[in-house]
Amino acid sequence: MSNTSPSHQHRPRVDLPDWMRNPEPPRRTLGRRLSDLIDAVPALSATRRRLWAWRDRTRFSERHPVLSAIVSFVFVAVVATFLVVGTLYLLYKIRRGEA
């Protein structure tokens, strides 16, 4: 056995307050009760897991970003063109006094 001291010093034990050592149980909020209800019913629990899987899926725009950008651009261009043409048509009708 060696009589050398340890290479590190132990810090003295910290006395935690009672509320930290023995915390109160979590409150039974409406959200916790609903979550427990969903977990208790197998069909609802399966639906929840399917919803989580659907939410975390890979979107089409993430798999094909270039194609999504092109389709989005064309869609926006067509909608903007229809809006401008519609506005010009309404202004034409108003100037002629037909509207």
Image (cartoon, helix red, strand yellow):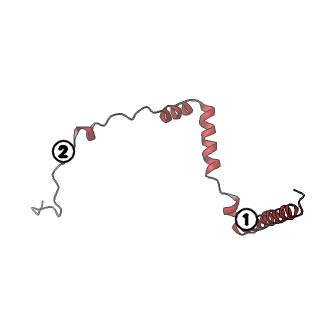
Task: Give the residue number, with chain letter if any, for mark 2.
Answer: 15
Q: Earlier in the sequence, mark 1 or mark 2?
A: 2
Q: Which residue is mark 1?
A: 68
Above or below for 26 versus 82: above
Residue 23 is left or right of residue 78, and the answer is left
Q: Position of residue 46 (x, y in %)?
A: 62, 37
Percent of width and height locating residue 23: 31, 37
Residue sitting farthest toward the front: 97
Which one is in front, 57 or 19?
19
Who's the residue at 22% across and 41% down the image? 17
In the displayed structure image, the side of residue 42 where residue 91 appears, left or right: right
Residue 61 falls left or right of residue 13: right
Where residue 48 sits: x, y (%)? Answer: 60, 40
The quarter of the image holding the C terminus is: bottom right
Residue at the left extreme of this rendering:
3
* Distance in Å between CA atoms under marks 1 and 2: 59 Å
Tell me the SS state at disc 1: helix
Q: Left or right: 48 with respect to 99?
A: left
Quadrant hosting residue 97: bottom right
Quadrant of the image for the N terminus?
bottom left
